[in-house]
Image (spheres, helix red, strand yellow):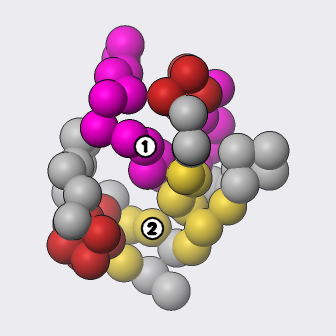
């Protein structure tokens, strides 16, 4: 599966923070992140950890705010 963040956001009804043309090749977990994938976090407290992975994108609750 290869989609852009814009395409994924359209499907999920999500807001994009960053480059909407970023390609996403699949999904990975926070414990085993893979480059060019989407990582989902259930708790906003995990955002910093997710930001330090090679994942291309993070799906998080709207209340999660990046410090970057």
* Main SS category, magenta section: loop
In front: label 2 or label 1: 1
Q: Residues within 10 Å of mark 1 (few under 14, many from 20)?
A: some
Q: Is residue 7 left or right of residue 49?
A: left
Which residue occupies 30% across, 69% down?
Answer: 12
Which residue occupies 57% across, 43% down?
Answer: 42
Vertical comparison of 40 with 9: above or below:
above
Q: Which residues are magenta?
A: 49-68
Is 51 a magenta residue?
Answer: yes
User: In the image, residue 31 lies at what x, y percent?
Assistant: 80, 44
- Please identify the quarter of the rendering in which residue 48 is found: top right
Q: Residue furthest top?
A: 67
Q: Residues within 10 Å of mark 2 (few under 14, many from 20)?
A: many
Vertical comparison of 23 with 14: above or below:
below
Residue 60 got which mark?
A: 1
Tell me the quadrant of the picture where the C terminus can be found: top left
Dot placed on the residue nearer the N-terminal end, 2 or 1: 2
Which residue occupies 24% across, 57% down?
Answer: 14
Vertical comparison of 42 with 29: above or below:
above
Q: Which residue is mark 2?
A: 24
User: In the image, residue 6 lies at what x, y percent?
Assistant: 21, 66
In the image shown, does 3 or 43 lie closer to the viewer?
Answer: 43
């Amino acid at each position: 599966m290869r989609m852009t963040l814009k395409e994924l956001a359209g499907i999920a009804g999500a807001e994009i923070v960053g480059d909407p043309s970023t390609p996403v090749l699949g999904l990975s977990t926070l414990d085993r992140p893979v480059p060019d994938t989407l990582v989902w976090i259930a708790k906003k407290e995990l955002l910093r950890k997710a930001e330090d992975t090679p994942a291309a994108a993070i799906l998080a609750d709207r209340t999660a705010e990046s410090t970057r």
